Amino acid sequence: MRSVICVNERFDAAWPFAADYWHECWQREGNCEFYRTDDPESRAPQLVPDPASVQRLALLGLPAAAQDLEPFSALEECFHPRYLLTKWWGDSSTDGIEAAIARGVSFIPHRLDVYWGQSVAEYGLGLTLAALRRTPQTYTAMRHGHETWKYRPDIGRPGQRGEQYGDDPRFTSGTLAGKRVRVVGAGNIGARYASFCAAVGADVAIWDPYAPDATFAAARVRRCFHLAELVKDSEIFVPMLPLTDNTRGLVTADLINALPRGSLVVQVTRAAVCDTDALYRRVLNDELALAADVFAAEPVPLDSPLLGRHNVVHTPHNAGRTRDANHAWVDDQIARFEPRL
C-alpha cells in the first residue's frame, strides 16, 4: 500500500507538531511519503509523483476539489479536515469529496474537540490552583520588593494576614479540597476537570442536560439538573462549554449575579458562553475573582482594567495547543484508518 501525506504551511501554523508526528507513525507501519509546501497555490497532484498509485492519503492544509482528488484514481482512504479548509480556500475547495466518496473512497471524518480535552482540563486545574493561592501575583511582587515577604503584622489580629499566609480572604482561597466546585458542561473538557477536582477532595457538581448518567458516575461527581441551583452555593464556578448558537450567553447576567460574593470563576473554553459584561463588572467591583485563558475581546487591550489585577489570573488563550494535543489529534485520525496488515 502506498501512503502519502501532503501538508501546507497553513496547517503547520495551526498544528505545528502534527504533520511530522503523523509521518513518524505511518513510517513505523511501513514506507510513507511526505510532501510539504509553503506555496499557497500548491495542489496535491503537483506534489505527488504518480498520484494514480496512491491508496492512502492525508491532505493537511491543501484543497480537496475535483481537480485535486480525481488524479488519485486508486485511492481507498483519505483524511481531509474539511472544516479548516473552508476558511482557507472557500467551499469549492472540498467539492471533490462527494465525487470521491461516490467512487468508493472512504473519508475519515474529522472529530472536533476530542484531542485537546486533557490539555485544557489540566490547564483549567492549574489556573484554579494558581488563583486560589495567588501564585502569579506573588511571583510578580517578589520581583519588585520584599513587601510580599512581610507576613507577620506588628500586632496579630483575627482574620488578617499572618505567618506564611498570602491568600486573599475576600475570595475563595486555600486548598481545592473541600471547596464547592460547580461545572457547566460534562463534555470532553468539563468531565475531566471535574474528575480532577473530585480526586483531591472537592465537592463537585455538574450541570449538563445532555450528558448520560454514566459520565457523572465515571467522574465521581454529582449531577445537578438546574443551572440556577448550580450557581447559588458555588465557591468555584467553571463554565466549560464550546461556543455554539445554543451556548452563547447561556450563563446569563442573572446567573452571574447569583454567584455568592467571593466566588472564583474559571474560564478556559470560550468566554462568550457567559454574559461577560456582568462577569467583568462583578470582578472589577471585587465581588468575584477570575482565572481566565479566554476573554470577550482577544487580544485583551493593554489598558484593560482586568490585566494585572489583584483578583485576576490571566493567560493569552493557550490552554489547548500543547505538543500532546497535536499528537492526540493525529492519533485520533490514524486510529480510524483501516489497520495496515
Image (spheres, grey):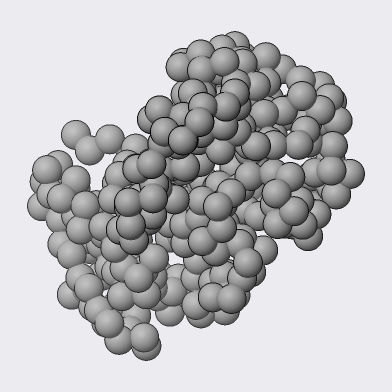
Residue shown at the point (59%, 76%) measured from the top left? 303
Residue shown at the point (15%, 62%) measured from the top left? 33
Residue lying furthest front in this view? 155
Left or right, residue 142 beside residue 161: left
Q: Position of residue 178 (x, y in %)?
A: 57, 15
Query: Measured along the vertical axis of the image, is residue 78 above or below residue 261?
Result: below
The reply to whether residue 266 is visible in this rendering is yes
Residue shown at the point (44%, 50%) measured from the top left? 137
Query: Measured along the vertical axis of the image, is residue 2 above or below residue 135?
Result: below
Q: Nearer the viewer, residue 133 or 19?
A: 133
Point out the image quarter for the C terminus.
top left
The reply to whether residue 82 is visible in this rendering is no
Q: Nearer the viewer, residue 253 or 77?
A: 253
Q: Position of residue 298 (x, y in %)?
A: 57, 69
Left or right, residue 205 beside residue 34: right
Q: Nearer the viewer, residue 129 or 212?
A: 129
Residue lying furthest right in this view? 254
How many marks on residues?
0
Q: Position of residue 299 (x, y in %)?
A: 54, 71
Residue shown at the point (56%, 58%) measured from the top left? 309
Q: Position of residue 62 (x, y in %)?
A: 38, 73
Query: Measured along the vertical axis of the image, is residue 9 above or below residue 104?
Result: below
